[in-house]
Every structure is written in structure tokens, then in C-alpha cells.
Image (cartoon, rainbow, N blue to C red):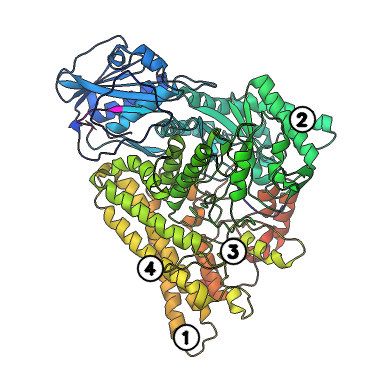
Amino acid sequence: MRRWVPYVFAAVVACGSDGGEEPKTSPTPPVTTGTGTPVSGVIVSFGDDVAPAVQTRVTELLRGSVGDRLQVVPATALPDAKDETTVLVGLGTTALTRELVSDDAAKAIDAEGFLVRSKRRGPGMLVVGSGSPRKRHPHGNLGVHHAAYAILEEMGFAFLHPLAPSPPVATTVPRDGLDLREVPRWTERTMHIHTMHPLELTDLLQGWGPLGPEDATGFEKQLPEWDRFLEWCVANRQSAVEWFLLYADSWKSFADSPVRIERLKRLVDRAHAFGIDAGLDVPIAFAQQHAFRLLRTQGTLESELAEIDKNLDFVMGSGIDFLGTEAGTSEFTHPDPARMLAWMNEVTRLASDKYDAHVAIKVHASTGQTAAGYKDPETGQDINFNMLPHFADKRLGVLPHTVQHYGLTDPAPTYGNTDFSYIRRFLHREVGSRPVQWYPETAYWVSFDVDVPLFLPLYAERRVADLRMLGLDEEQKREGANGQRMDGQLIFSSGWEWGYWLNDVVAARAAWNPELGASSDEESFRKVLAPALRAFGSAAKEVEDWLVDVVRAEYKLLILGEVAGKRPADVRMRNGQAYLQGWETWDDVSKLSTDLPVKLPPTQPDKLGLVDMRNPAHGGPGYSAEVAPILAAMETSFAALAARGGELAKKVPASAKDLMDDLADAAQMTALRAKQVHGLYDYVDDFYNVLDQQTRKRRLAEARAALDAAQVVVAGREKRYRVPAERIAGWRKNPTAYSYGYLWTVHSLHYFWRDEGKAVDAPVFPCYLNVINPVDVANGEGFGTDTVRFFGSVLSSDQSRGCLAEPEKEPVYPPDGLRTRP
């Protein structure tokens, strides 16, 4: 959310037996990437504990692989393999399954866990899967669904991009057989699709089609994409999905309509068909970014609670299993704490008592707000307002949240923080007294990562490191942990192109098994990563090593600001992330407000700005000694890593080529961004050096060449997006507070152009090239939004509209003849 605006399972040698206790967390079996036994025919039998939607999909995938040599037989059948290339598959409660998993052994599997076993049967091989359903709100047998997709992965299928599964070039089964026993470390493993952002599925998840809420046909056509995502959840061991519910005055009649509820219920029903729980994030009074609010009119407490109940009844008509919600009126503003508690408790009471639905509330990472009169049990001072749920109904779950790629113990100069250690302590303090899910991010979006774009597998590694840390805290009773386990993880996901699918895959699988037995964070990351990379065939180990090297470089340069083994004493304005990320209008306004009576909270790391540098008294770090070395190191390091990625793209099998090309293109864009930024800063640094203007012009030309090269990469990649490029990279109406898709700033290279313009023209006006309506983003549509749009419309140009409103039409780049200067 934004953030501020103004107000393996691989083969092992032995086959399984029925004996023994199921482990609480199974170690990941060693990964094999060699060829297995070729499969030309499959005979599959489904038990009635395999949901029809999963039966249909598994059948489709297998038929796509072996064609008319697929045979589906009844659960009671005991067929024989025709030859050694035929595989018999028993899923769930079938006669075939019972040959390797007794009924007692199946009943003994822990909730959501599964067994996969195999043996030679006649000339062919028998592979079976059995599992156990969820304890709460089971929709079919999720454990056996996990088993089904584990078997498919063993046969060569991959489920990495959430909308584009990868079939194998040749279907195989491991020569040495299978014996997999897996149960999840944590019971709740949820994906939060942050539909406050204009993502791949945002239209659909609001009940819209691409043309708007009236586009029922477009809504229908996108439903198969939802099924592919739900399949991805099952394959990557997730148990639930949540998304943000939106509302705006311009489409309020649809927002509150039975038609919308019916469409939402169809989405929920399809989730249940795969065994996945579904929930909605519905704020109470939180008005940011077109949020649907349970409370829209404040008055007496009695009237407020009645309105909350009415709107909650409407939302629950969608059939959801759980509800997420938000404290405050935005991430940075809040009502009276006692009133907020009363609202929280009412939502919890009604959802729990009337609908048997669990409610959890976000605990945001913003700073500077306290709840007067409510004492922090750790400090004795007024508690951070975000932590007010500590005093709420114990049935209300909490979602301790961190932002961006920073780990719990990393320096994190964002949102007014130095690090997130206090979030870690709060999490452990709440475990055992109420439900607790860890709530990190795999993409932030707003000018920070995927919308530049930056290739950041660092997100994936930091999420594994965090879960490993939290798991070891639980085991060793560290940092206030009481020996009890948190309930699980909720992943804040915000876009899947440019390699961001990888972050979600790794973070999702780490919640199933964070590899606590690993000797280091890197080993844990490798163990989680390696099974997902089997799709890359014989190049898998090289891809793994490359990704680990990318992460090492990014951690040192982007987070620590480390160059040649030396770290700055103060990481603020001296870390690589601050310079590679984009900067939009409200980042600049926030920075300028530090000298004003009213300070606007920063939402990303600060930097020495391109315009600031022209002021000899800027007060920031010295460029030559403190900033230039890290810019140079990033340019060199990321260029070399991008070149390696490009070479690896030539080695992967055809079935994984699109995935590897995606990673390689993202790495190339990051290298070009580093080259551009370094050139622009060198150009500005020598502004007053009248004796060497040729060097300045050469560095600007090199920066411009990097931007031009980036345009070529973007044009090529857009043709390969998994949904129509116009949906996610166009300037278009959508349900969010933004006038464009989440990758429009990539399509236009908005942040590249904005930095070039600041380097060349040094605009004093902080709202240079603004593309958002601040009131709409902060407070939603209404009188304030209409007012700023009106005043913006009577001004002479989009430059004059500035901070007041978004442009009336899509901006064109380069702006204002920029390339004719200097």
C-alpha cells in the first residue's frame, strides 16, 4: 500500500513404508536435475477426496503432455501398466493408493501434510499421493491437492509464474522412485494480492472486466486466469488468498451492489474448489487509495457500530472465510484510540459470532503516531498506534508488517525507521495470546522496485532469512519468543513480471519449510530455491549460483552500502537502493517537508538528490567520497551479473526459456539503471567545473544511451507479458486511485526520464512530472478530488497542475524537448 501521499521434493533412493510418525517439518530431499525414466503414457485414478476442479486440471495437464495415452480410471480400479514407459498414478483414496499408503497411515498425516510414494508395478511405475485437509474451514482435502502437484513437479511440470505454468519438454519420473513426507511448519500460508495497486488481477478481483464494472463479458473471460493463480497457490504450498476490496464514488452504485457480491462469490467459490481459503482486506475507516470502508460516516458510537455491522454483512455475503482489516484512517493518521478499539472489537465480534470468520488487522511499520493512554508493555510509554490491537479482543489476529526488501535486523532507513527489530519483538509478544501472522513484502511497487524496474531476488532471500530467524526464535525462545509458534505468513504481493514471480515462489515455499536446519541464511535460501529451479534443467545449478551471487551483491550494495568491504558509519543517503529506485513527486515533497512545520513521513530511503547537488551547501554526504564509489560499484557489479544472466538464458531448456529470459531482461534493466544513474550524477557533480565540460557531456551521453537501451529491452519484454500489456502497462481507467497499470512507469521509463530531466534542467518545482492525484490516493474520490482536478484543469499546463492533480492525458517522453538540452 502506499505509502505516503498527503493525507521435494526430489527423488530419494528408498521407497516408502507405512510405519513411523510424520515429522513436523520434513527436510527438503536432495534435488536431482538429471533425466528420469521417460513417460509416454499415464493411467490416473482419483479418489473422491480430490476436488473435481483439481481432477479436471490434473487431467488437462497430463493430457497436454502425453496426449491420447492418458487414461482416467475409477477409484476402485487396479489397472496394469502396458510397458515401462507407463506410469500409474493414484491420488487420494483409491485402490492404487492403498497399495502404498494404508488407510491408517493416511489418517495419521498431520493437517495439510502429504505423502508421495512409488514402487515398480509390473513393467511400469506406480506413484501415489495421499494427504490431510485443513483443520479450520476445510474445503476438500488440501493435503492431497499438494500431493497431486508435488507429483506433477516430479514429472517435470513447473508452477513458477502464477499465470503461466510450464509444461515439461519431456515427461519423466525419477528412476529411483519417490518417498516424500511433508507437513507445513506453519498452518497459515496466505497470499495477499495488493489490489490497491493496478496489477494483473486487480480488475477481476474487484468484479470488473477490463472495460469497467459494467463489463460482465470481460470479467468472465478473465476467470481462467484466477484458476491458474489458485493452481499456483496449491503447487507452492499455500493455504489461502486475500485481496483488498476497493470503492470509489465514480462507481459506487456497483461497489455496493448485489451484482458485485455475486461476482466476488464466484471468485471465492473457485478458490474453495481448489481447497484454498479466501478472504478480503476491508478497512474500517482507512480511506487511502480507494479502500472500501466499513465505516464511511462518523457520528455517535452507536450509529458507527450499526454502519459497520451493515457493511460487514454485505461483505460477508461473498462467502469469504476470513477478513483482513486496517487500523487508523491511513498509514499515518488515526482517530481517537478508544474509538478505534471499539470499531476493531465490533468487527471481530460480528465476524466471529455470526459468520465463524477469523479477523486479522495490519500492524504497519509507520512511525510517529502514539495511542495516548495505552501503555506499551515493553517501554511503559504510550504505545505506537499501529500496535493498539494489543488491547483488543483476543480473537482479533495481528499481522506485524515490514515494508520493502529489508529483513527484520537489516538497516532499514524507510518510513522513519532505522530497522524493524521492534516488529520482531511485537510479533513474539503477541504469539500465544491471539492469532499472529508475519506480513512481509515481495514487492512494494510505488517507485521502489518492479515499476522502475529493478531485478531484486534480494526480496526472496530476505523473506527466507526472516522466516528462518522467526522459526529459530520459536525453537530457542529468543527475542521474547515463548516457545509457541506463530500461525504463519501473509505475503504482500504486488506484481509478477520482471522476475517478481520468483520472489513469491520462494517466499511461499519458505512458509511451508524455512529450512531451520541450514547452517546459514544462504544455505537456507539455496535449499528453498533449488527445487523451484528444476525447471531449468541441466542449467539449474548455474542459475542457482547466479541468483545467489546477485543477492550477495544486492545485499552489500543496496542495503548495507558496502563497497570493497567497507560500510558507511551512517547508511542513510549512502546505500545503493536510494539511488536506483525511482523518485516521484511525493517522495520529493516529503523530503522538502523536513524543513517545514508540517513534516510528511518518508516512505523510502533518502538520497543526495540530483537537484540538491547543485547547491554547494546541500548538507548531504560528499559525492566523490561517499556516493560515487557505490554508484561505480553498482554499475560494474550489476553489468557483470546481467551478462552472466544473458549467457545462462542460452542454456536452459525450451520449456523454461521464457522464465529465464524474464530474469535476464530484468537483470539487464537493473544494470542499465545503474549505468544511467552513475552517468547523471557524474554529469551534475562537474556542473561548476568549467575546465572539463567535455567529460560532463560524455557522461550525460552515456546516461542517455543507457535509457535508450532500456527502451529496447522494455519493448521486447512487453510482447511477452503474461496478460495483455495494455492492462498492466497502459494509461487506462481501472478500479484503483492510479490512472495507469502498474508497469506504465516501465513502459514509459518515467523514472528514468524524470531523473534525466532533473539532472539537465534542475527543476526547483518538486512536482515536476507528477502523474498522480494526491487527494484521490490519500482519501479516495469525492469533493476534494474533484476540487483539485478542477483547479488543475484551469491551469495552463501539466507542469502548472503540478502537485494538484494527475495529467489530463498520458504524458509523452522525452518531456519538453529535453533531448535538445544542454
Q: Mark 1 Cα within 10 Å, few/some/many (few <14, many 20+)?
A: some
Which dot, 1 or 4, sits closer to the camera? Answer: 4
Residue 373 sits in which quadrant? top right
| C-alpha gap between disc 1 and disc 2 | 66 Å
Q: Secondary structure at mark 4?
A: helix
Which residue in the structure is indicated by mark 4?
636
Residue 264 sits in which quadrant? top right
Q: Answer yes or no: is residue 361 visible.
A: yes
Give the number of the disc on residue 693: 1
Q: Earlier in the sequence, mark 2 or mark 4?
A: 2
| C-alpha gap between disc 4 and disc 3 | 23 Å
Q: Earlier in the sequence, mark 3 or mark 1?
A: 3
Q: Earlier in the sequence, mark 1 or mark 2?
A: 2
Q: Position of residue 558 (x, y in %)?
A: 48, 61
Q: Position of residue 138 (x, y in %)?
A: 51, 20
Query: Up-down: is 566 above or below 12?
Result: below
Residue found 73% across the figure and 26% down from its top: 310
Residue extending furthest toward the top? 76
Which residue in the structure is indicated by mark 3?
606
Q: Earlier in the sequence, mark 1 or mark 4?
A: 4
| C-alpha gap between disc 2 and disc 4 | 58 Å
| Amino acid on which disc 1 is placed | Gln
Q: Secondary structure at mark 2?
A: helix
Give the number of the disc on residue 307: 2
| Amino acid on which disc 4 is placed | Thr
Which dot, 2 or 4, sits closer to the camera? Answer: 4
Q: Position of residue 292 (x, y in %)?
A: 67, 37
| C-alpha gap between disc 1 and disc 4 | 24 Å
Q: Nearer the viewer, residue 618 or 196?
A: 618
Q: Earlier in the sequence, mark 3 or mark 2?
A: 2
